[in-house]
């Protein structure tokens, strides 16, 4: 099985979807995962998809972060030790992603804006129409790959809704900085360029391929922070008095969070870092440090950096997940995000290596080039 294959053309999917969306009923008037939604905050009279001033964006971000962590009147179930029960299967499948797409200038959307954004989202159009492709278009012989399709829509599950977090439709997980982007510093960019976090373009041996391609570690899912992708966006949380385990559906990476403990020696730098946790009222707080430079999630860290996560039951159907990334060596400020983890039915097996034909195919291709005397090194780097 290969990972991160090119998505279908966004323009083509939008054009197809727009033809059918004019008179189609909106199937997303009610979020299927959540209980009673709180009222969305006021938005400017002009569409939030239009330009907003920096002061408005700052105020919006601060207002969102200041909202209560639990739905008014909600009392979470508790374990015998008195702490809230976070256990269950939760999903962050969503049209919302970590950083804010350029088409959005605002963190929040009202109901009408969210409905419009859902109808126009390329992945939603693709899942509704499968790009109107038929078997005659090459679905069974691979000819559709020429259009940039790694999978047809049957095989993906990216979510069909923007995030409704604390009762608000959100356009990015990042809430601070207000522009919804990762605030890399110039020194941070140089550090990242000199500490490539993963391999992925060699042909000589498996170690030259990426960790995800080798079914070892998929940082986007495993985190921290927990972020979403094309499929396998579920997590299982298991909880005891002394530890909390978060199992990701992707590759089934499981992070063990030791409660009321000290960090392990720095020499034990795991792919997902070293996580310890404690309770602050009804919120589980997790601190992660010492992340292996070849692992990690969507937030790279130097040895001096750390990530703080917070888990709070928002209501019966959602866990509020917050994170903040603190690493002055990489970023101009501490940056923060929020998302709703929604109740999901189950965690499914991800048979990674059983279908991993791509890895053997890539290395076999490299050996075939060796026998022909053809170099795999082109244009200054190894390329497939």
Image (spheres, grey):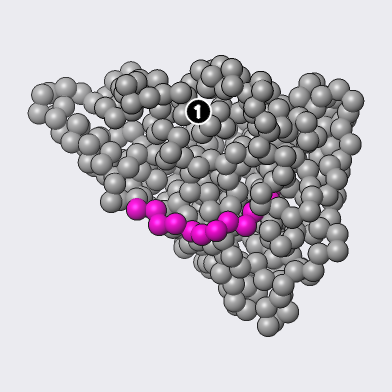
- In this rendering, does residue 172 appear at all? no
Per the image, label 1 sits on a secondary structure element best described as: helix
User: Could you tell whether 25 is left or right of 51 in the image?
Assistant: left
Q: Residue at x 71, y 75 (%)?
A: 78
Q: Considering only vertical position in the picture, is 379 above or below 234?
A: above
Residue 21 placement (x, y as % from top left): 63, 23
Query: Residue 77: which quarter of the image?
Result: bottom right
Residue 160 placement (x, y as % from top left): 60, 39
Residue 292 placement (x, y as % from top left): 48, 52
Q: Which residue is drawn at 86% across and 64% down?
A: 73
Query: Residue 317: which quarter of the image?
Result: bottom right
Q: Residue at x 34, y 53 (%)?
A: 351
Image quadrant containing the N terminus = top left
Q: Which of 121 and 107 is in front in this view?
A: 121
Q: Dot 1 corresponds to which residue?
A: 129
Residue 335 placement (x, y as % from top left): 71, 43
- In this rendering, does residue 124 appear at all? yes
Q: Which of 246 and 270 is in front in this view?
A: 246
Q: What stretch is highlighted in magenta?
A: 339-351
Q: Considering only vertical position in the picture, is 327 above or below 100?
A: below
User: Could you tell whether 66 is left or right of 369 in the image?
Assistant: right
């Amino acid at each position: 099985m290969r990972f991160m294959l090119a998505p279908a053309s966004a323009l083509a999917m939008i054009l197809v979807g727009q033809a059918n969306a004019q008179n189609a009923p909106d199937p997303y008037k009610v979020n299927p995962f959540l209980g009673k939604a709180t009222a969305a905050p006021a938005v400017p009279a002009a569409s939030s998809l239009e330009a907003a001033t920096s002061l408005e964006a700052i105020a919006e971000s601060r207002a969102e972060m200041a909202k209560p962590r639990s739905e008014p009147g909600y009392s979470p179930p508790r374990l015998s030790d008195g702490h809230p029960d976070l256990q269950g299967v939760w999903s962050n499948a969503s049209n919302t992603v970590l950083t804010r797409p350029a088409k959005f200038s605002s963190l929040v959307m009202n109901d009408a804006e969210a409905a419009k954004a859902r109808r126009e989202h390329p992945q939603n159009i693709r899942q509704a129409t499968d790009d109107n492709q038929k078997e005659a278009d090459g679905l069974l012989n691979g000819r559709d790959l020429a259009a940039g399709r790694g999978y047809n829509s049957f095989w993906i599950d990216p979510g069909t809704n923007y995030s409704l977090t604390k009762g608000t439709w959100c356009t990015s997980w990042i809430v601070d900085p207000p522009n919804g982007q990762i605030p890399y510093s110039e020194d941070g960019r140089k550090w990242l360029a000199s500490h490539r976090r993963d391999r992925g373009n060699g042909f000589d041996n498996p170690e030259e391929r990426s960790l995800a391609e080798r079914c070892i570690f998929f940082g986007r899912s495993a985190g921290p922070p927990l972020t979403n992708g094309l499929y396998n966006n579920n997590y299982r949380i298991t909880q005891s008095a002394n530890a909390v385990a978060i199992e990701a559906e992707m590759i089934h990476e499981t992070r063990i969070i030791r409660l009321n403990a000290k960090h392990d020696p720095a020499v034990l730098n795991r792919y997902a870092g070293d996580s310890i946790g404690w309770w602050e009222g009804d919120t589980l707080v997790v601190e992660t440090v010492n992340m292996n430079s070849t692992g990690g999630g969507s937030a790279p860290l130097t040895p001096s950096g750390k990530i703080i996560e917070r888990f709070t039951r928002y209501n019966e159907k959602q866990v509020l997940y917050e994170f903040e990334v603190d690493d002055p060596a990489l970023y101009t400020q501490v940056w923060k995000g929020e998302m709703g983890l929604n109740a999901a039915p189950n965690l499914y097996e991800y048979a990674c290596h059983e279908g991993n034909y791509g890895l053997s195919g890539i290395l076999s291709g490299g050996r075939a080039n060796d026998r022909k005397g053809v170099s795999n090194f082109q244009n200054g780097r190894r390329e497939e």
